[in-house]
Amino acid sequence: MIVREFKQKDKSLFLELCREFYDSSATVGNFREDIAKMTFDRVMDHHENLWGFMLVDADTDKAVGYSLITSYWCNEEGGNVLVLDELYIAPDNRKKGYASIFMEWVQEYYRDEAVAITLEVLTTNQAACSLYKKEGFQPDGFITYTKKIK
């Protein structure tokens, strides 16, 4: 598998995959194309802490999924924490090891820039929970509370 940064030509593909992700049971929000376009544009403008990656099958050169990563400084951890904001593997490409390969790639790629990786997953998404546990992620005891201000 090849992991590469978004290219401008990926916009429609990203929107398609993003729509699939938000239409799945892995999220609680609804797909908003305007927000997805804004996100893609911010990635392309090289936002200081937002990165977008296409996951591409090396043999077929077809995208199998995408990921959005962001980061923040964490006093508690003593450094930058990566947030695996979105990781989506298209249904036809699941159970082929792509997510595990990507997780290993992230750890290596950001090894010198971050001290930890965090993510959120719905407790009902047992496949994702199992994957993340297999990759060494553990529940941290925190509960996320969200209040919309816009």
Image: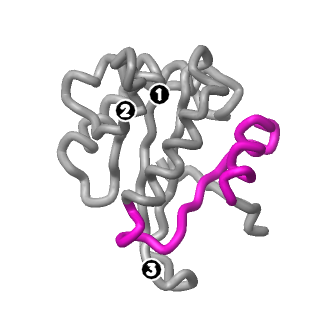
> As shown in the figure, which amino acid type bears the numbered disc 3?
Gly
Q: Could you tell me how far apart the alpha carbons at marks 2 and 1 are, in whole angstroms?
A: 6 Å
Would residue 82 be found to the left or right of residue 49 on screen? right
Would residue 101 be found to the left or right of residue 61 on screen? right
Residue holding disc 2: 54
Residue drawn at the location 48% of the way across and 68% of the way down:
81
> As shown in the figure, which amino acid type bears the numbered disc 2?
Met
Identify the mark nearer the N-term, 2 or 1: 2
Residue drawn at the location 37% of the way across and 57% of the way down:
109
Q: Could you tell me how far apart the alpha carbons at marks 3 and 2 are, in whole angstroms?
A: 26 Å
Asked whether residue 128 is drawn in magenta, I would say yes
Query: Vertical placement of 133 versus 96: above or below?
Result: below
Asked whether residue 63 is drawn in magenta, I would say no
Residue 120 point in image, percent of width and height: 64, 51
Residue holding disc 1: 65
- SS at mark 3? strand
- Looking at the rendering, the stretch of residues picked out in magenta corresponds to 110-136
Residue holding disc 3: 79
Using the image as rendered, state which of residue 38 and residue 92 is in the foreground: 92
Quadrant of the drawing holding the N terminus: top left
Residue drawn at the location 51% of the way across and 25% of the way down:
31
Residue 39 occupies quadrant: top left
- SS at mark 2? strand
> As shown in the figure, which amino acid type bears the numbered disc 1?
Gly
Q: Is residue 35 visible?
A: no
